[in-house]
Image (spheres, rainbow, N blue to C red):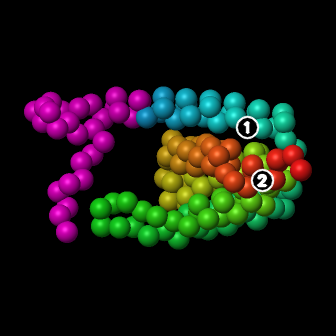
Amino acid sequence: MPSDNILPFTARRSHPERVPDPGSAQRRFRWFVAALAFVWAGGLAAALAFTPFPSIWALLAFGALVIAAEHRFILFGDETSMSSSIVVILCAVAYWSESAYLVGPMLVAACGGLLFRHLRSAAWTKIAANGLGMSVAAHWLHSHSEVRSRSQSPA
């Protein structure tokens, strides 16, 4: 299996003689995470305004399952990985399809960023990016799912 096909985020193919500044890439990433946090907070505020808050026990149970699923991932040879956390998030979408259909899945999916190795190394930007990205994806997934359209269609 070839291993020379993986390039760092800061690598430039067109001008390999230029050495990119790793600090500028980190700054751009932090700005991206800040914008994502702004979008997430707006979506959560709107969701809280229109849907009830989910059951705390179900929220804790699904959150713990997402954290456990994120820690049981498969790492492939090309540096990609896969975990079963999306299955838990889909279960949360189905579970809250009648009540807290936006807030519940968003908060459960946000637990996906809580990886112990990132907490130990205080990689707060990675934690935020992973959790916010999963949460925004869960919000989008639920808004386009068949569960929502069946449960909220007029009888």
| Residue located 39% across and 67% down the image | 75
Above or below, comparing residue 22 to residue 89 in the picture = above
Q: Amino acid at mark 2?
A: Arg
Residue 19 location in percent, x, y? Answer: 18, 33
Q: Which quarter of the figure has residue 87?
A: bottom right
> Distance between the Cα atoms at labels 2 and 1?
23 Å
Q: Is residue 56 left or right of residue 134?
A: right
Above or below, comparing residue 51 to residue 59 in the picture = above
Q: Is residue 124 visible?
A: no
Q: Secondary structure at mark 1?
A: helix
Image: magenta residue range: 1-28
Residue 39 location in percent, x, y? Answer: 62, 31
Quadrant showing the N terminus = bottom left
| Residue located 64% across and 36% down the image | 40
| Residue located 66% across and 60% down the image | 90
Q: Which residue is mark 2?
A: 150
- Foreground residue among 132 and 121: 132
- The label nearer to you, 2 versus 1, is 2
Secondary structure mostly seen in magenta is loop
Q: Amino acid at mark 1?
A: Leu
Task: Tell me the number on the disc at residue 16.
Answer: none
Q: Is residue 4 left or right of residue 59?
A: left
Specify whether residue 19 is painted magenta: yes
Mark 2 / mark 1, whichever is N-terminal: 1
Q: Secondary structure at mark 2?
A: helix
Q: Residues within 10 Å of mark 1 (few under 14, many from 20)?
A: many
Task: Tell me the number on the disc at residue 44.
Answer: 1
